[in-house]
Image: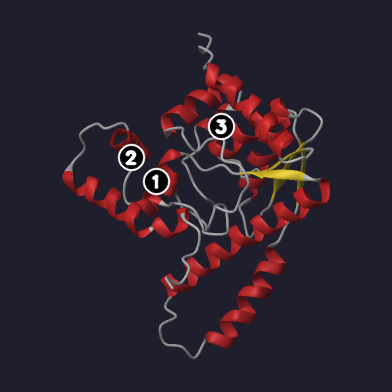
Amino acid sequence: MKEKHDPRIDRTVEWLRFKVTEAHAEGLAVGVSGGIDSAVAANLIKRAFPNHSLGLILPISSQSKDVEDGIAVAEAAGLTHHVIDFTKIHDIMMNEVMNVLDPYAALNDDIRRMSDANLRARLRMSTLYTAANTLNYLVVGTDNAAEMYTGYFTKYGDGGVDLLPLGKLLKREIYEWAKQLGVPRQIIQRPPSAGLWEGQTDEAEMGTTYEVIDRFLSGETIPDPERTLIENMHERSMHKRQMPPLPNW
């Protein structure tokens, strides 16, 4: 059965074109992870700028399946793409910093892992901007409404972008758009993951599911413990959605 076309897809494509024109830019770039959000974003930028859109696949100690899925997304969309492996650069940076900070007792395994994960996101952001600046492109983010509300993104990492075409979409709407845009089935069926470490999944890290967050954002009733969890994530991540504070002189 053919998927019903959501007219917001076409409006989003037109919005992307308008924002590029407004910025006196020439095209769009996106990081392609092999996940469903980046797959939808990749298809949108290809539709908006068939000849001026770029996907970068940026593995850092990633599983080969992640790279393969990223390539599959780009090829299915017809998107110009390149793979740049930053594993060595990431390892050098982490080792240098950890060697300096090693005497600090507070550096437990959880803190180290999160620092490592955030560095990966920030290296990818820097790479995207280096490429985009060189081509006079804008950088497109892949965060959806659930991630925006809960702050489930790295500050100055995957949160460092010019445009957020998926920022108003619930996760279930992302899946609907993916089907309409022809995203490969294996991508749609993948468990959502930011690819921050081996075996990492979004829902396990957040402690709730996208389905529950979607219901919360839609104004539906959810269990009190999960409502509290989501509201706490929103409050703690407020700084990610605002400019850095200035002194109140």
* Residue at the spot 22% in from the left edge and 50% down from the top edge: 228
| Amino acid at pointer 1 | Tyr
Quickly name the residue at label 2: 213
Circles 2 and 1, Cβ within 8 Å, touching? The answer is yes
State which quadrant residue 156 falls in: bottom right
Tell me residue 4's x, y (percent).
Answer: 50, 11
Reading the chain from its start, which is encountered first: label 3 or label 2?
Answer: 3
Q: Is residue 125 left or right of residue 164?
A: right
Q: What numbered label is drawn on residue 149?
A: 1
Q: Is residue 234 above or below residue 30?
A: below
State which mark lies toward you, 3 or 1: 1
Circle 2 SS class: helix
Work out how far the residue at label 3 is from the one at label 2, CA to CA, in angstroms: 24 Å
* Residue at the spot 59% in from the left edge and 85% down from the top edge: 99
State which quadrant residue 87 falls in: bottom right
Q: Nearer the viewer, residue 230 or 23?
A: 23
Circles 3 and 2, Cβ within 8 Å, touching? The answer is no
| Amino acid at pointer 3 | Gln
Work out how far the residue at label 3 is from the one at label 1, CA to CA, in angstroms: 27 Å
Q: Nearer the viewer, residue 236 or 95?
A: 236
Quickly name the residue at label 3: 186
Q: Nearer the viewer, residue 50 or 119?
A: 50
